[in-house]
Amino acid sequence: SDIAARMMHFFSEPKALNASGHPALSELSKREMEILERIAEGHTNAQIGTRLNISTKTVANYVSMILNKLQVVDRNEASRILQEFREG
């Protein structure tokens, strides 16, 4: 399954570090960072879509790309990475 493949990738690949020493955040586009910030605030895909004037399906696609780039399996892990970066 897709989740199993992502988990295998997560545990087998070394993490790419950006200049801050934080994995993968530098790979996110401006739009992906906007969406990650909304995720960290606890918003649903529908709420994010309404706020950014894009469809819920488009948000879901962005969320999938964010999780893949950050090599995490859920929104909570992605939020934790952003929080750790902010606390830096």
Image (cartoon, rainbow, N blue to C red):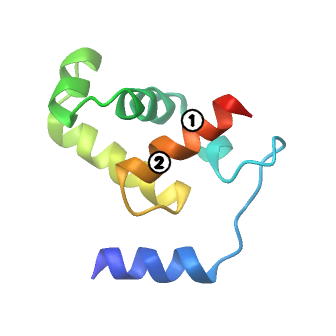
Query: Badge 1: few (under 14), some or many (20 or more) residues near its Cα, within 10 Å?
Result: few
Question: How many numbered circles does the render carry?
Answer: 2
Residue depicted at 84% across the width and 43% down the height: 19
Is 77 situated above or below 34? below
Q: Secondary structure at mark 1?
A: helix
Residue 60: horizontal and vertical position, in percent? Answer: 24, 45
Residue at the far right in the pictured view: 19
Residue 39: horizontal and vertical position, in percent? Answer: 36, 34
In this rendering, the label closer to the viewer, 1 or 2: 1
Earlier in the chain: of badge 1 and badge 2, it is: 2
Q: Secondary structure at mark 2?
A: helix
Residue on which the image places disc 1 = 83
Q: Check disc 1 and give the amino acid type.
A: Gln
Q: Which quadrant holds residue 11?
A: bottom right
- Give the quarter of the figure containing the C terminus: top right
75 sits to left or right of 32:
left
Q: Which quadrant holds residue 25?
A: top right
Residue depicted at 18% across the width and 19% down the height: 50
- Give the quarter of the figure containing the N terminus: bottom left
For residue 78, the mark is 2
Residue depicted at 65% across the width and 78% down the height: 13
Is 14 situated above or below 83? below
Residue 49: horizontal and vertical position, in percent? Answer: 21, 26
Label 1 and label 2: CA atoms lie apart by 9 Å
Q: Check disc 2 and give the amino acid type.
A: Ala
